[in-house]
Amino acid sequence: MHLNWKIAVADAIQMALYAVLAPVFLVIYIIQLFLRYLDDSKEVNAKHVLITGATSGLGEAMALKYAKTAATLHLFGRSEAKLKETEAACKNVNRKCNVKTYAVDITDSKKFVSMIEKCATEEKIDLVIAAAGIIRSTSNTPEDPMAYMDECIDVNVKGVMNTILPFVPKMKEEGKGQLCVIVGALGNGTFGSDPIYEGSKNCVRVMLEGMMGPLRRSGVSLTIVSPGYLHTKMTKGKKTFMMLEPSYMADRIFEGLQRKDSFICDPYPLYLLTALVRIIPAQVFVSVREWLAPSKSDKSAWFSC
């Protein structure tokens, strides 16, 4: 096979730049940690919280966590019956908490946006948590790549942006407010096992990172959460030693939002692994992924051509 020396040289230069810049990024991160340690600003305690995906998993865990301290909870979910269960659980935690529920499918954009916009204009909201998400295990059409792609885009991308964007104008005008999005560790790169899901999460992460600076200058805090595997229906059947309980991750997010952290991640080993995937040049990753590719009988390769 003929070697294209121009491409080879470009690849070598790219690898060299990664090697040089990686330590610089590490130093910057350490400085940020040190500045955070010195920060003695007052913690933020949101009293009026809106949460999507509140009927199960991390969204439900966040609802139960904020029920302890919030005055008002606005909970969104597809199932009205499950929303009532979450509402009852929140009431058991704190009888004084005013819990409002909204049964709507996030893929029904017109209806969902109408409800969200009403909350944004008529309700007092300090914190918005976009926790609704979909993965292959919870998809209605997991074996149909085109339909599954539509679901992931509608929920993981459009659903997230439809949740937070209506609150941005008012928060910017008031110079305060918090937005939090559950992206997930697989939103930091791709392992190639579910490229449609991973692609949707990477897509929304890039948009959020682009929004973060301008919002911060307006006094609005945006937090990206990258949890690893959690014991939820989304990870049913998966076996990993880094599996966490949703209640534990809810505690981590609560603490991070009190500090207005821009990024919250746990467990760190998985986050580090996905971060390394982002650093590795695409051509290297694709080659390694090809060598380690599953057999044709592996169902995880349903998207292969």
Image (tube, rainbow, N blue to C red):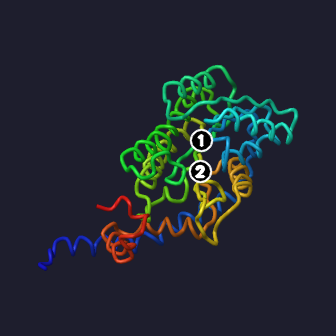
Position of 114 compared to 64: left or right?
left
> Of circles 2 and 1, which is in front?
1
Viewer-side residue, 16 vs 124: 124
Q: What amino acid is at disc 1? A: Ala
Residue 116 at x, y percent in the picture: 58, 27
Q: Which residue is mark 2?
A: 262
Report the quarter where the C terminus lies.
bottom left
Residue 210 at x, y percent in the picture: 45, 45
Q: Which residue is mark 1?
A: 130
The answer to which image quadrant residue 42 occupies is top right
Report the quarter where the N terminus lies.
bottom left
The structure residue drawn at horizontal position 48% and vertical position 72%, both measured from the top left corner, is 23
* Alpha carbon separation for disc pair 2 and 1: 15 Å
Secondary structure of the residue carrying tag 1 is: strand
The structure residue drawn at horizontal position 70% and vertical position 45%, both measured from the top left corner, is 60
The structure residue drawn at horizontal position 50% and vertical position 59%, both measured from the top left corner, is 186
Position of 65 compared to 257: left or right?
right
| N-terminal-most mark, 2 or 1 | 1
Viewer-side residue, 71 vs 197: 197
73 up-or-down from 222: above or below: above
Position of 146 compared to 125: left or right?
left
Residue furthest front as drawn: 297
Q: Is residue 278 visible?
A: no
294 up-or-down from 62: above or below: below
The answer to which image quadrant residue 52 occupies is top right
